[in-house]
Image: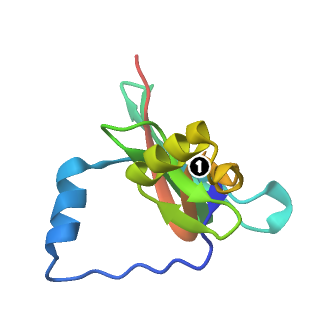
Amino acid sequence: MLEMPNVRLRRRERITCNEEERIRRGYQIQVSYAFPPGGSGVRLQEADFLVREQPVLQLVYAPATTIAYINRGWRTHMEGFLVDVTGGELLSDSSEDRASAAGRSGAAATQSQNLERLKLWVREYRNAPVLTYSRF
């Protein structure tokens, strides 16, 4: 996985045709969270919801929770994104096809050795309520 720590997001009112294409194709996004470590001084607040004295729901509120968004790639393609790890450039799948063809012909073999398929991820810190359903 390749962390992208300097990424900033902002909402846009209008989208371009490239963004429409990305939305149509769709990404595989995985969201994970981790509560702050126990010794950090941050206290979790917990509440249980009971029905007939049986726990039904549990609510945990955690300030400063780490939330990670992992982009696993396009839904219809191989998992991950093609990255030139030497230059840090994201490449299209057609670039991978050209690099592998060049490698088979003996040309530009050194360039294709620097390509890796990676998952991209970013993290942020938010106050997070987590609701968990309990079965009877």
Does residue 29 show up?
A: no
Does residue 98 appear to the left or right of 103 in the view shown? left
Looking at the figure, which quarter contains the C terminus?
Answer: top left
Residue at 63 percent across and 50 percent down: it is 112
Is 66 or 92 nearer to us in this picture? Answer: 92
Residue 41, percent from left and from top = 79, 68
Residue 11, percent from left and from top = 28, 80
Is 104 or 48 nearer to us in this picture? Answer: 104
Residue at 71 percent across and 54 percent down: it is 110
Amino acid type for the residue under numbered disc 1: Leu
Is 80 or 41 nearer to us in this picture? Answer: 80
User: Element type at marker 1?
Assistant: strand
Does residue 56 appear to the left or right of 23 in the view shown? right
The residue to which callout 1 is attached is 118
Residue 71 in the image: above or below residue 7:
above
Residue 44, percent from left and from top = 64, 57
Residue 81, percent from left and from top = 49, 51
Residue 92 in the image: above or below residue 50:
below
Asked which quadrant contains residue 86, the reply is: bottom right
